[in-house]
Image (cartoon, helix red, strand yellow):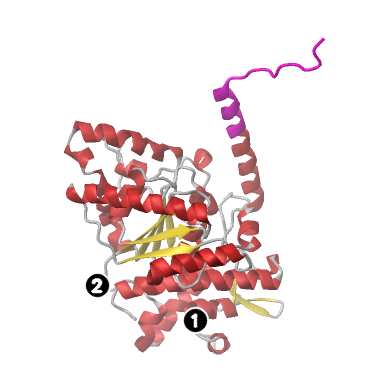
Amino acid sequence: MNAFTSLPSFELDDKILMQGAEISRRLNQLRLENFPPSAKKTLRPFSVAEVAHYLGVTPSNLKRLYLDGKGPIPTTVGSRKQYTAEQMWELRHYLAETGKSEAKKYVPQRKPGDKLQVIAVVNFKGGSGKTTTATHLAQHLALTGHRVLAVDLDPQASLSALHGYQPELDQNPSLYDTIRYDDQRKPIADIIQPTNFPGLDIIPANLELQEYEYDTPLAMQAGSEGKRFFTRFGKALLDVDERYDVVVIDCPPQLGYLTLTALTAATSVLITVHPQMLDLMSMSQFLLMLGNITKTIKQAGADVRLDWLRYLVTRFEPQDIPQVQMLGFMQSMLAEEILKTPMVKTTAISDAGLTKRSLYELDRSNFTRGTYDRAIDCMDAVNFEIQGLIHRAWGRM
């Protein structure tokens, strides 16, 4: 008798639907445990040193304020003073009103004539840190006083999950509801959701976004509306233009109609790249394809002018000699267009992701001090450099 028995066959659709439902159920259980009782994310309080850092003042200035009873009053935990994120926002406006010569420093929002900054975070290859970059950039900009809209264009919805939205359970609309071609379109204002960060809203993603990739070729055959698919997102943003200073788009890791629609709406592009040979080869193919497609849609009337384009090296390991050599190789070619600070690979980010949180949401007490400080210092350096590019686009130094 044969000692081996054949494996039983199974229906693929039944199998993966069952496993997908079970994973979703378990993830929701984790969410309920982490964010009770409403399953909505909250945000930790911030220390005086952190608040001073993001406001651009000294801790002693803040101490003087609360001792004089001015501005929002921090809570005391042990011997430490702490502000909520809402109080940080209040404090920013209080400082702007009482120190008028520095108002722009404390509330660095758009002024009349400044255009909405739309940043598309892109890469053709998964695992480049694109969603991590988009998440932390959007949250950093909110912490530093900007009004931000994060847009999740990836049907896998990782950016949404990091902000507490689980698409198959929450059933929130996605950008597809605004850019679809039929009469069921919704205004973009109706699909925007709040986050746990004051000043930061989000348009979550869901699997329905993928329908745009199938609908667009059909719409292109049907008439002129489809042929100008690339204008749909930019036109939708006009309805909420005055509500925001910056839009951060997490694009899907593919060069499809969603990515092209986002890139046409963008005023700037941030390309994430891991410093490995295969990743660089993939990026070169992405750039060649993108350039050729962009020429085609430009001929069809797309406006593809940008204020800036930058490459961010992600998951960088300074002790890895081949990565250091690859970074040098990239710098020799791309020079000024690579951000000065690479984003180092750190366990702090992966550990934070295990609970669907960002570095900005977790207190340093959750890590060994050195690990957290290195990660947050690097993340802030990257994001302050990008913030500087945004301000330069508005004509500020």
**Which residue bears the numbered disc 2?**
112
Quarter location, residue 4: top right
Quarter location, residue 100: bottom left
Q: Which of the two residues, 295 or 42, is positioned nearer the viewer here?
A: 295
Q: Is residue 337 above or below residue 207?
A: below
Look at the image and tell me whether residue 290 can be seen.
yes
- Residue 184 painted magenta: no
Q: Is residue 96 above or below residue 386?
A: below
Question: Spatial distance from mark 2 to mark 1, Cα to Cα?
Answer: 28 Å
Disc 1 marks a residue whose amino acid type is Gly
User: What's the magenta region?
Assistant: 1-21
Q: Which of the two residues, 389 or 25, is positioned nearer the viewer here?
A: 389
- Looking at the picture, how far across and down is residue 198, in whole percent? 47, 64
Q: Quadrant of the C terminus?
A: bottom left
SS category of the residue bearing label 1: loop
Q: Which mark is residue 71?
A: 1
- Looking at the picture, how far across and down is residue 87, in whole percent? 51, 73
Q: Which of the two residues, 207 or 30, is positioned nearer the viewer here?
A: 207
> Horizontally, is 23 left or right of 306 in the view?
right
Instruction: Say which residue appears at 47% left-offset and 69% top-offset.
Output: 383
Earlier-in-chain disc, 2 versus 1: 1
- Looking at the picture, how far across and down is residue 74, in whole percent? 58, 77
Q: Is residue 214 above or below residue 262?
A: above
Q: Residues within 10 Å of mark 2 (few under 14, many from 20)?
A: few
SS category of the residue bearing label 2: loop
Q: Which of the two residues, 386 or 364, is positioned nearer the viewer here?
A: 386
- Looking at the picture, how far across and down is residue 244, in whole percent? 34, 63
Look at the image and tell me whether residue 361 can be seen.
no
